[in-house]
Image (spheres, rainbow, N blue to C red):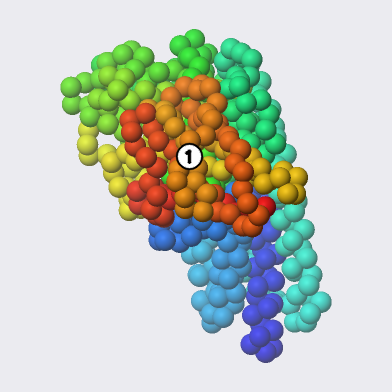
Amino acid sequence: MSGKRRLVGAAAVGLGALGAGELIAASRGGSVLDGIGRLAADYAPVQVVETMVAQGGAHDKELTRLGAALSAVAEATALALLPTRLRTPAAAALAAGTAATALRGANRSVAGAVGAVATAGVMRAGFRRPPADLGGVALWAAAGVGLFAAAETLVRREDRRHRERARRVGPMGSHAPVPEDGFGTEPGLSPLITQASKFYVADVNSRPPRIDPEQWRLSISGKVAHPLRLSLPDLAEQAVEFDAVMVCVHNTVGSGRSGNARWFGVPLTALLDHAVPDSGATRLVSRAVDGYTISLPLEPLRSGEWPGYLVIGMNGEPLPPEHGFPARVFVPGLYGQYSGAKWTTALELTDDSHVDYWWKRGWPADPLWVRPQARIDVASCGTPGSGKCTVAGVAWAPPQGVSAVEIRVDDTEWIPVELGAELAPSAWRRWRTVVDLPPGDHAIQARVTSRSGQIQDPVTRPPFPLGPGGLHTVTVTV
């Protein structure tokens, strides 16, 4: 068999074996690919992670799964190149490593591990009688694609069941009328409240973990006088509604990794008052079901200087799974990466010895505050020859709030725009104006000023390591 045909055959066997393992894992509620993807997120160089987020955008999770599949097929191909006597121990080592990865994933089940072992077994069997012609290669490849499709069907069906179970928890909030800011509906302009289905999703898992709301409890432990274990009904009794924008640290100017919602959560001050922190407690650690942690200085949270919440609802409903069901920590004004963990299962009070997930990856330990930013959603000109163009968008500067938004055309003077009514200082604020422009192409920029006097940073900066900077710029043609 030629070297090229051998490689193609090995890749086809790898695809078929991985499809079989993924289907077996999916039948038990897990995934081999999700485990591999989480491993990449945990240990890939930060530059690789940043590139994936920047290039993948809203599809970064799908790209992560695709990358995991390609890497697994590449590993299978590499196994085929080993001497025969080494293939079995190499396949066993690969299975053990992948199984261990699956066991530490978000669902912490044996399903992914079983799938990894099954993948290695099918792969080893395929290498004993590798496909010798194009027909055999096509058969293995087609089997792999079909098995993947079947696995995806099972996973999506289980995800839908979990989503419905989360919805049945009941209303989470007062179901007050949708708030208004006086602007009504402007074609292309972001709504005042972002629907959960339109809200950005950012985390290190390919899929959200499945959590039984009846079994779930929030534990508050560590350096406290009164450890607590609270159910969702317990938390709902103490929860309040508040409006706030949430911004991802990867939200470059003009992008969509931000959203404004009406949240329902328990003030952290109330929970801390019940638990009574010890004198040695200096940090509050929010811990997700998969062990992911984010910690924040305790004193500003305890005093209320930083208003933080354990959120259990979003826009009148329970948190959707992808947004952290059944609970997440949120401190308005901090970037989401620093605000708190999704799928929170524990709040732990500890000292300064704790090391967070992102600190290990090279991000700074001090909390990152959201940079004031204005986004242009609409830049449209009316009938030809009129020259009148509508420019509108949203701006945020939490927690102080937006005091002014300005635009400029072709690097001329900044001019103020009309602001919609403010929901809350921590929420975003819509804005709009009409400008009269001469024929031709024109560059329009926007900037925001916060109530503290901070003007939007005009210097273009990448998200890593202190958050993005720059001015959103669009071009219109009259």
Residue 217: x and y in percent read 47, 22
Label 1 neighbour load within 10 Å: few <14, some 14-19, many 20+ = few
Residue in the image at 25% along x and 25% along y? 299
Of the residues shown, which amino acid type is indicated by label 1? Ile
**At 69% across and 77% down in the image, what residue appears?**
9
Report the side of 105 relative to 292 (left or right).
right
Whole-percent x and y of residue 280? 18, 26
Q: Nearer the viewer, residue 221 or 252?
A: 252
Q: Secondary structure at mark 1?
A: strand
Task: Name the outermost residue toward the bottom.
Answer: 2
Identify the residue under disc 1.
415
Quadrant of the snapshot with the N terminus: bottom right
Of the pair 449 and 291, the residue shown nearer to us: 449
* Residue 107 locus on image (x, y percent): 54, 40
Q: In this view, which residue lies farthest toward the left? A: 279
Image position of 464 (left or right of 235)? left
Residue depicted at 78% across the width and 72% down the height: 138
Q: Quadrant of residue 76?
A: bottom right
350 relative position to 205: left or right: left
Towards the viewer: 385 or 183: 385
Which quadrant of the view contains residue 331? Answer: top left
Residue 354 visible in the snapshot: yes
| Residue 57 appears anywhere in the view | no
204 lies left or right of 340: right
Exactly how many numbered labels are in the figure? Answer: 1
Residue situated furthest right in the rendering: 135
Picture residue at 37% right of the left edge, 28% below the top: 451
* Residue 58 picture location, percent across and down: 59, 49
- The quadrant in which residue 64 appears is bottom right
